[in-house]
Amino acid sequence: MKTVNQVYINGRFVTPHGEELFDLYNPATKTVIGRVRLADEVDAQTAIAAAKAAYPEFRQTTKAERMDYLQRLHDAVAAKTAELVDRMVEEYGAPRSMSSGTVARAAEAFRLAKVLLETFEFEKQAGAARVVLEPLGVVGLITPWNANYSFICSKLAMVIASGSTAVIKPSEMSALQTQLLTECLHEAGLPSGVFNIVTGRGDTVGTEIVRHQDIAKISFTGSTRVGKRIAREAVETMKRVTLELGGKSPNVILEDADLEKAIPLALSAVSINSGQACIAGSRLLVPERLLDEVIRLIKRHSADLTVGDPRQKSTRIGPLVSQIQYDRVQGYIRSGIAQGAELIVGGEGHPEGLEQGYFVRPTVFARVTPEMTIAREEIFGPVLSVLTYKSETQAIEMANDTVYGLQAYVSGTDLQRARRVAEQLVAGRVFINGLYDLPQAPFGGFKQSGIGREFGTYGLEEYLEPKTIAGHESS
Ligand code: NAD
């Protein structure tokens, strides 16, 4: 049993003021594997004060100094890859391949931020004026449990690159992963107070960060429900916000798609991160006349979605993170059945022999209609809804008939046509004929999937405020 009884404030591991103890589970066995002592509002305030005190000096650092810090952060995380992967598998239940990818992305975020700084110009000319891009100040980073390391590192990388300082509130359910990651980040030897990590509850630590007047910006990844609340509260102190929220991503199979490739891809897209992915392709839109063939191929290829022990190499889908998540997904499966969708793969309950963890059966519904709950709401589990369309125009309308707009997928052989469809989809990213890792391209949502973009130049600019300075240059 591991105990986390420290938070990280002002460059030191300290006992939190908060006293609440919170159990941490292995979701593959439902057993308690650890306990965390949670931070509270007072800890959040202490962390904010430390970040505020560190800011005046850190904002003066040169690009070269910050590049050096970013390299050191990369090296410190990369050096502990094996331990970080094991911890993620144990506490979160992500299969090894997903866990390894997450750790690699976490380390890489720092390296890419360093590369970005090599050419990024913090001063630009606008007509007769000079525009200086200034860091914002103290930034609050609030992250969810479904890829803890990479959310923390990709946000922190931009904070460091910009010259701001940070208070980070990760999910309380990822405390063991956060503890190990914090040890790595500490090893990098950044000046005290530049980043502070306070694991606590959303309604205590999170709320304090969102309300505090010394926080200039919130970068949040999580649910649309909490994102809306943060946006409303942030406006009181006119904080900048970047919100990465939920999704209900459409996957449009065009008439000329190669179904032997498109269907396995569709099953991969809905089961990314065991289905607990904001970018999961959870609505499959297929031409009406291809439905029978699509159903046949889904039944055949879904046998490849091996559910099981996340430590095994062959496992593609691990357990869901918690009982709450398990119950939520079961509720959606029941709702699909009750509203008359045709269950073609999976269904309620655990896969046979996997009753000991929060494992669910990968599930596919056909003949789903657009008004059904499973076609509209984010499920956050490996549940696919197949809908049919009669024309390309209708496919685009159906794809865009959602409050979300994070990601979309298109499969088709004629690439001009696939691109034409992609251009009409209202989503922050559209993937044609594949799943791609694009850590330098902007990531973020249209509509209720969020505000702002992360990664690359667009991501860095979200941490900078333009200031116009005129009249100091001799003509
Ligand atoms: P969540 O919204 O419940 O929690 C996210 C974080 O916000 C946690 O750290 C939580 O403690 C904190 N929080 C909760 N209430 C708060 C409040 N009132 N004030 C401040 N902070 C608060 O989300 P979750 O269940 O942890 O994660 C799943 C959700 O995240 C899904 O909806 C998913 O789509 C979304 N998500 C989005 C992206 C993206 O990049 N767009 C990526 C991953 C997950």
Image (cartoon, rainbow, N blue to C red):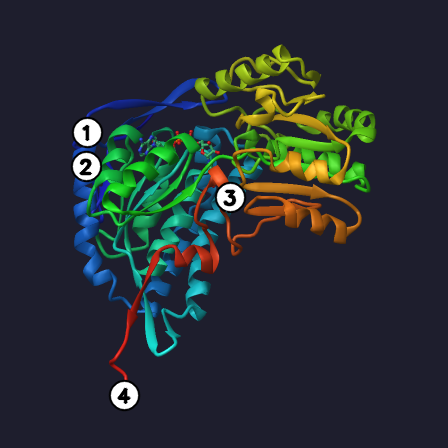
Earlier in the chain: of badge 2 and badge 4, it is: 2
The residue at which mark 1 appears reads as: 18
Where disc 4 sits, the SS reads loop
Where disc 1 sits, the SS reads loop
| Mark in the foreground, 2 or 4 | 4
Q: Residues within 10 Å of mark 1 (few under 14, many from 20)?
A: some
The residue at which mark 3 appears reads as: 446
Horizontal side of residue 280 vs 222, given as left or right: right
Quadrant showing the C terminus:
bottom left
The residue at which mark 2 appears reads as: 43
Q: How crowded is mark 4: few (under 14 residues within 10 Å), some or many (20 or more)?
A: few
Q: Find the residue positioned furthest to the top.
A: 338
Earlier in the chain: of badge 3 and badge 1, it is: 1
Horizontal side of residue 353 vs 83, given as left or right: right
- Nearer to the camera, 286 or 344: 286
Where disc 3 sits, the SS reads loop
Please report contact status of discs 2 and 4: CB closer than 8 Å, yes or no.
no
Please report contact status of discs 1 and 2: CB closer than 8 Å, yes or no.
yes
Badge 1 amino acid: Gly
Q: State the mark number for residue 474.
A: 4
| Ligand 1 quadrant in view | top left
- In which quarter of the view is residue 308 placed? top right
